Amino acid sequence: MTAATKSKRSEPPPAAKWTHRHLLGLEDVSADEIRLVLDHARHFKEVSTRDIKKVPALRGKTVVNLFFEASTRTRTSFEVAAKRLSADVLNITASGSSVTKGETLIDTVHTLEAYRIDILVMRHAASGAPHFLSRHCTSRIVNAGDGMHEHPTQALLDLFTMQERGKSFDGLKVAIIGDIIHSRVARSDILGLNKLGAHIVLCGPPTLVPKRFEEFGAQRTTRLDEALDGADVVYCLRMQFERQQANFLPSVDEYVRLFGVTAERLKRAKPDAIVMHPGPLNRGIELTSEVADSARSAVLDQVTNGVAVRMAVLFLLAGVN
Amino acid sequence: MKRNGTCLITGGRVIDPSQNLDTHADVLIRDGRVAEIGKGLKADKAATLDASGCVVAPGLIDMHVHLREPGFEYKEDIASGTRAAAHGGFTSVACMPNTNPVIDTPGVIDLICMRAEEAGVVNVFCIGAISTGLEGKDIANIGLLVEAGAVAVSDDGKGSQDNYVLRRALDYAKMFGVPYISHAEDKRLAADGVMHEGHYSTLLGLSGIPSASEEIHVARNAILAELTGTPCHIAHISSAGSVRIVREAKARGVPITAEVTPHHFALTDACITTYDANFKMNPPLRSEDDRQALLDGLRDGTIDCIVTDHAPHSWSEKQVEFPYAAFGVIGLETALSVACNELLHKGVLDLRGLIDRLTCAPAHILNLNTKGSLRKGVDGDVTVFDPDAETTVNADTFASKSRNTPFNGWKLKGAPVATVVAGHVVWNARAASKAEA
């Protein structure tokens, strides 16, 4: 039995209609709308299994990947997704703040819009940059990660992967481990999982997992074993080494000792628990190679599913008047 | 600026907290000074201002503005900033020293005074730096600054980060009788924060500025004010903890006062959910609990006065990604309306209390003995306003060079009607609206 056929089919088909001009985050996306994206992603995933991996859905449309931060994985995933929908794709990388370049972000995007583009996929180091831009531009915007705020398509592909691995969200225990406060992935995952009824446990030192996250409906613990106990999904976040210099952590060694996921410690999770990571992963730090390469690891599934989910998002946005 | 005008203001409700006055009467200003308050006054050759249906108050004083001249005239200058003050009902402003060059030499004060004489519409007072270059290392020439006209010393925008230097500066400043105005902020704790650290900063993924970064400095200032005996005034107080510390210090007799801005008592960090940089300021908009504590502080007198912290910024400094936007908003042209709407009509302060916090209190803190009052013989500065007039904020009509207001489009109850400086009507809304018609 493949992973895909194991996924739950008992959930009713989504009743929602996609009405958002932009995908800025999951905060204002409903549970039904999330299910709608996942449902479309399931169909688009099939496209990637064909000999000719292309459908004409976005033929004649122009998608611009505007990345103000270095990114290979997310950018190429969006590029593959857009091309499989037959869109024309323009990749633009820019470094640093628009202010320091001497041109405002608004001017940069107005220049691009003069080419009559349709969808702007934007990554930016500043939280809220796509929200700010949405007030000044006519094209659809997909937030591909804004500062420490949200990374909605990552969360959608995470949800899709969980669903595909046979997880039903209602009551699902998801342990998210690591640097929560600085993680846009964690924020979007928390928002998405919450809407779908999952039980979220955040784990890490208090410097990286402040108490305030409990206000978002998540449980919080500083003990890894407690987070792993009976978990259905173990989601490790990438360790950002610069945090050590900023006094969030005493050392990487201590972090590994306290919060590194090993095969031994993973025994506390449910026998069919899966391990996820947004990548790129630091082997031997967030999790051991033994765990990363085990059958429980869904890391490569996440990468594959990223294309299907992003195809679904681009398709749905293009259809909104 | 002409200084000896004669003007008769008729038919208004005259409220002057400095002499416990609340009466319907005329106010006569002769040769730039208040000459008489009474019924049925006549004056030949005097400009007459009809104040019927309005409140006639001592001229409003804003003891915390940034006029940006010298150095940042593209944002504001003395001419435009004082015009904005007049449009907002302010007859006097005190400008902060974080100009370029910094107000740390008598020459800069001379320059500002000269420009204010030439192009100013309202009275301009200077606040000198407490440390050279606002760097917090060496005590500025406070004596020379006071001699040149400085009415207070401050490290506004920076915050004195070195407790030893501040202690010595306060000891030294004591002999000149000027207050220290504290920008209370521990920069290390504030770190790279861009908004209040709380629920919304967590949700929005923006770095937070904890209330503790302000409260630590407020507590320190209270301790050093007690130690040195030099009056310490807390600028733009924003958190519940700060209000509590000031209240406790005042109860112990410490020479400490505090001010609040309209944006801090009217808005909260929940406003930032759209990432609009017109809600970005320092200190940041805080939580609803903090806002309620500020209102309590105004009610019980812990917070002495209302200021604008008028901080003009150009379009390109605000229409950018939120973390990169400049801190600060303008307020001269909206302060009175926001205060009427949020304080008077919501029962936080009565008219007397509101006027006190905009006139007598700042005059007292800055030792401006001829301002903030309508007593016979004092400077003939008067503000006429209609507390019930309905107005809609339209930043496009502002006299300020900048437009960075969080109140654009707000419908407010209460508006300035006319501004009189030394007996000259420097702004009259009714005349302006007739001219427009």
Image (spheres, coloured by chain):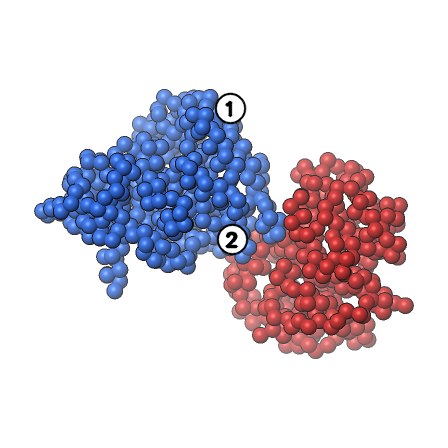
Chain colours: A red, B blue
Drawn side of residue A234 relative to residue B368, left or right = right
Depth check, front residue: A238 or B262: B262
| Dot placed on the residue nearer the N-terminal end, 1 or 2 | 1
| Structural crowding at the residue carrying mark 1, measured as other residues with C-alpha within 10 Å and reported as few (<14), some (14–19) or many (≥20) | few
Above/below status of B94 relative to A84:
above
Above/below status of A236 relative to A23:
above
- As drawn, which residue projects farthest toward the left? B44
Amino acid type, callout 1: Tyr
Drawn side of residue A250 relative to residue B426, left or right = right
Residue at 88% over, 48% down? A267
Q: Circle 2 sits in a helix, a strand or a loop, which is it?
A: helix
**Which residue does the numbered mark 1 point to in the structure image?**
B164
Depth check, front residue: B400 or B103: B400
Drawn side of residue B160 relative to residue A206, left or right = left
The image quarter in which residue B117 lies: top left
Depth check, front residue: A83 or B257: B257
Q: Quadrant of the C terminus of chain A?
A: bottom right
Drawn side of residue B65 relative to residue A160, left or right = left
Amino acid type, callout 2: Cys
Residue B271's disc is 2
Instruction: Please tell me if label 1 and label 2 are on a single chain.
Output: yes
The CA span between labels 1 and 2 is 38 Å
The chain letter for the residue carrying disc 2 is B
